[in-house]
Amino acid sequence: MKPFPSKRVPKFKDVPDEQWKDWRWQLSHRLNAIEDFNGVINLTDNERRALGEHGLFRVDITPYFASLIDGEDPSDPIRRQVIPTYKEISTFTGMMEDSLSEDAHSPVPGLVHRYPDRALMLVTTQCASYCRYCTRGRIVGDPSATFSRDELNAQIEYLKRTPQIRDVLLSGGDPLVLAPKVLKNILTRLREIDHLEIVRIGSRVPVFMPMRVTDELCEMLKEFHPLWINIHVNHPNEITQELAEACAKMADAGIPLGNQSVLLAGINDCVHIQRKLVQDLVRMRVRPYYLYICDLVEGAGHFRTPVSKGIEIIEGLRGHTSGFAVPTFVVDAPGGGGKIPVMPNYLISSSDHKVVLRNYEGFISTYEEPLDYAVHDSKTCKYCQSKRTEVGQSGVFGLLDGESMGIKPEGFDRLHMREGALHRLRADQDKWKALGIGEESQKDEDQ
């Protein structure tokens, strides 16, 4: 099997291995000013202009990751992810500061509770390096905006008093840039909460700085199983021998690994690049998890692709490589709708006894539906009954599960109570309550 490459640009050749492999040395020698790139990257005038721009999203690149860039190629896929261009100043239709409405779903600072049974815990605003398309550019990278001890305590307390949460994802910023004692303290406190079953860590540190994944770190993480880690690789050029060794250490420590990538114009918007990426990932025991469409965040307009490009890529992966190597393509819905999977249409048609399907080659087949299927009885199923006691957003599944007949937009009933119907309802307070319109709504209509 062909080994993964290992690179170090001439500028860093004389750095002793002991220092090069020290993650603290990598952090303290990151490149950010124009002069730092001398001997590493031949900056274009556009890049120089952007690097000199006041108020631009933070630039920091570890010497290890900078060594993976082709310094003579302005279109290098790694270069474009971490070195700014003046396109970041451009606005675009739909641009938002907080495109996922995380702040609106944040009951306490730094904790996002968007889905019923899981929460996102932002534990730092710092990263090893900074992606130019960062979803949280509004808070990430500012050393003065990091979360305080009181805010961390508030996050923990919210988790303790919310028993429906069984899964917590640590993110930020990047949790693996935290001091080892700080990270261990957070994990210890989470494991003291009885109803938390799963702890996950989202990190790009293994990609930006694989030397952070030490034997000591893996031994510490093993104490907190079941623990999962998702890394973030966007292009095959980011996969090196050092990253493979870091992933091997984590996998050998019993940590399931996944990868989340972002579809980026001019970087990985190609079926063949994506196929190479996912196949290299599974070689490292990393399962492709999500492929995201680029979010509508400030400064990321030039990275965006049409949604149809993602569908095309999945079309070129499904059936053309191992099923477990195909990620789920998702649009993280603007406005806080969460992740919505989007894929090619494999279901062509259906009737009351048959479905018509097509495969990746265009082969069309039918599947005969059973005529004697006994419908599952949720009234006698102990699992169904126990889940009905949970508090959360059941959504469309709630309709299938018989919780209600429909889902109505806010104010739907009130909007349709026109004139005569409204006057009749005013005479009967019980009808007001039955329709979910309280006294405050009635007062508004009277004014």
Image: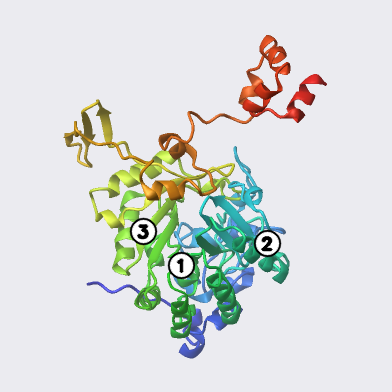
The answer to whether the residues at label 1 and label 2 have Cβ atoms under 8 Å apart is no
Q: Residue placed at 72% from the left, 59% from the top? A: 54
* Residue 260 in the image, given as x and y percentages of width and height: 43, 58
Q: In the image, which is nearer the foreground, mark 3 or mark 1? A: 3
Nearest to the observer: residue 68 or residue 229: 229
Q: At label 3, which amino acid type do we have?
A: Pro
As drawn, 196 above or below 410 = below
* Residue 279 in the image, given as x and y percentages of width and height: 29, 61
Q: Which mark is residue 10?
A: none
Pointer 2 or 3: first along the chain: 2
Q: Is residue 348 left or right of residue 411?
A: left
Q: Which mark is residue 52?
A: 2
Nearest to the observer: residue 362 or residue 80: 362
Label 1, residues with CA under 10 Å away: few <14, some 14-19, many ≥20: many
Q: Residue placed at 54% from the left, 42% from the top? A: 337
Q: Quadrant of the N terminus?
A: bottom left
The residue tagged 1 is 69
Q: At label 2, which amino acid type do we have?
A: Gly
Residue lying furthest top: 420
Q: At label 1, which amino acid type do we have?
A: Ile
Q: Say which element carries label 3.
A: strand
Q: In the image, which is nearer the foreground, mark 2 or mark 3? A: 3
Q: Say which element carries label 2.
A: loop
**Residue 317 visible:** yes
The residue tagged 3 is 288
* Residue 380 in the image, given as x and y percentages of width and height: 36, 43
Q: Residue placed at 42% from the left, 70% from the top? A: 226
* Residue 240 in the image, given as x and y percentages of width and height: 37, 72
